[in-house]
Structure formats: C-alpha cells, structure tokens
Image: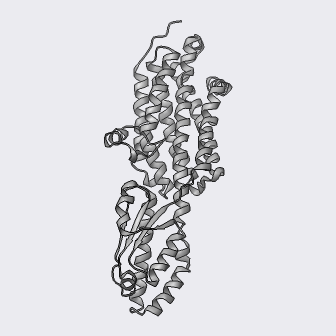
Amino acid sequence: MTIYLNTIKRILRRKMNLLLIFVMPAVLIITIMMFNDSALMVGISSKDKGKFFHILIDDIEKRANVVYLKSEDIKPNIIEGVYDCIIKIDEGFSEDIISGKSPKIKIYSIKESNTSENMKIFLNSYLNSAKNIALACNNDSEKFYRCFDEYRNSKSMAEYISLKAKGENARKVIQSMGFALMGILYFLSFAATIIMRDKRNKTYYRIFTAPVTTKRYMLENILSFFTLAVMQILLLLYFINVLGGNLGKSFFDYFVILLFFSLFAISFGTYITTISKDLRQAQSMASLVITPILMLGGCYWPIEIMPKFLQQLSKFLPTTWCMRACEKIAYGAKLRELYIEIPILILFSVVFFLLSSWKKTDITV
C-alpha cells in the first residue's frame, strides 16, 4: 500500500487541493446558511370571514408568512412568482366545512417546489380532518369547534413539522449540497491529475521497475482518491450540520449519495487524465467541462428556471441525478426510495471507468 499512502500525502501537501477540498465549498456553504433566509410566502384571497377561516389562517401563519390579497391581484402575483403559493377561498367556506361538504378552496402555484407541495399536502390533510370531525359532530357547529380545538391541540396535530422551518432548512441544505458537489468534483478531478504529474516527472515509469503492475498502481491511486473523498464528504456534511442544516437522521443518506457521486468524480478525473496529452491539457479540460456540468445539473441554481431544452439536456448529467436525490432526502425520502438516482450514478461511474481503461499506452523504460 506504499503508492496508496504516498498519494494521500502528496495530495494533502498541495495548498490548491486543500482549497478545493475544504475552503472553497466551506465559504459558499457559510454564505448559503447565513444569508439565505427566505421563508415560505403564502398569499390569501378570501371572500369568507367565518370562524373556521380565521382558525385556518392562524394555523397557516404558524407555518408561513401570510399576505392578504384582493382577487384581482391573484393572476399578476402568480405570473411574477411573488408567492410560493396563493390560496383562494370562496364565500361560504366555513359553513361548508361545518356541513361536512367539500370546501370551496383553490391553490395556485407556478413554482414547482416541494415547499409549495408541502403546503398543499398540509391543507388537504387539515381540511379532510375538519370535514371528518364535522360529519362526526352531525353538523353541530358548537360541538364541531370544541372537537376541532381538541384536535388542534392533540399530538397528531403537533406532529406536523413547521413548513416554514422545514422549507427554509430544505432549501439551505439543497443549495449547500450543490456547493458540496462542486468541491467534490473539482477536487477529485484535479487530484486524478497526479497520474499526469507522475508521467511528466517519469515517476510513473520508474515505479514499474519494481514488482508493481499497472492495475495495482491505478487501483491504489483510485483507493487513495476514494479515501480522501470520504474525509471530504464527512467534513462537509458535519460543517453543513453544525451551521444549521439540521441533517438529523438523513446524515447517513446524504453520505451514501455523495459517496456514489464521488465514484463518478474519480472515474471522470481518471478519464480526463487518460485522454489528455499532458498536465496542462488535463487541468484545462477539467476546468472547461466541470463548470457546465455543475451549472446545468442544478448545483448553482434550480433546474426549473432554465429553458426547456437545457432541462432536457440536464437529464444526461450525473449532477442532476445527485441533486434530485439530495432534494428527495431533504424532504423526507429514504435511500430505498432513490432506486432511480443511485443506479444512474453507478452507471455514470462504470461508463467513465470503462472509457478510462480502453486507451492503453505502451510503457517503455
């Protein structure tokens, strides 16, 4: 394991590598955690002023910032994307709830975000519970409000996580993961150029005067890259967590996903060194290709804001699938539910490792 240990020492000795491993992603993550405080914004337009309406608004305000709108303001605000969602409530809403009827309510949103979806899920569950309580109370309004107050104070209601806090935290974590991917991809792609340095310094060729095969040399190098990737991922996740990312039980899920992505980053860096003629070309090629991969993959901004043809193009990038996996985890998904994203990341890694192995160079001593 001499090559393995020596490679780790050589990589950690270079200040540029330390910058790519920790400093650059850490600074960006701090920026996200400190300044990205946007809360869930909900617009309310209502013709109903009944008691249940005020109870509903009170519970929504615990989970989001609420702004009251006129009905004519709904369309322009939806188009401009001012609010995460706008709730329109028709006249007779409170009476319909007490009567056990389907409530007259509409939810508008053009932002395809899990945050607005969570609000829709909350409202559906909230109103269905109210409807069921009303039916059980035989449309008796006094009994209904008494029972519904008990429901609101019950454990089942208390278990709802604040959408405002959850939405803010999820957005911060997702954006932080984007910058974590940036650090991983840049570091591992440039770390793989150590093979080019060995070739330039003739170290690569002198190694084979000893009983060392090409496969062993490559395997120990890849293993050293993977070890450093594990260290980088653990530190970045710990950093996100202590800065308020609140990864909780999802820490391990994020760790596994980033490990799969690091395998792609290693395979990609190895492929770059394989097709490059010298160190300068390898570094230039990595810099030229990595930035678009990160941009189109949603690491810097949401994929949804890009033109349709770029959204389609992004499906062919591993960063897209890793960010999708991170987004799903941020909103409660488990590893077993990522049965599409994980195999795709593995496939990308396998393809680039195979491409790296196809080009052979004769070694002359």
Of all residues shown, which one is farthest toward the top? 365
Please report the residue visible at 43 percent of the width from the left and 73 percent of the height from the top: 125
Please report the residue visible at 54 percent of the width from the left and 41 percent of the height from the top: 179
332 or 267: nearer the viewer: 332
State whether residue 183 is above or below residue 190. below
Q: Can residue 44 be seen in the rendering of this structure?
A: yes
- The quadrant holding residue 314 is top left
Label count reads 0
Figure quadrant of the N terminus: top right
Please report the residue visible at 48 percent of the width from the left and 79 percent of the height from the top: 54
State whether residue 171 is above or below residue 124. above
Left or right: where does residue 318 sit relative to residue 17? left
State whether residue 42 is above or below residue 350. below
113 or 260: nearer the viewer: 113
How did the renderer colour the structure?
A: one colour
Q: Position of residue 224 (x, y in %)?
A: 59, 30
Left or right: where does residue 309 sit relative to residue 200? left
74 or 89: nearer the viewer: 74
Q: Position of residue 335 (x, y in %)?
A: 48, 52
58 or 249: nearer the viewer: 58
Q: Position of residue 310 (x, y in %)?
A: 35, 39
- The quadrant holding residue 111 is bottom left
Q: Position of residue 19 (x, y in %)?
A: 63, 31
Q: Can residue 253 be seen in the rendering of this structure?
A: no
Figure quadrant of the C terminus: top right
Please report the residue visible at 53 percent of the width from the left and 59 percent of the height from the top: 39
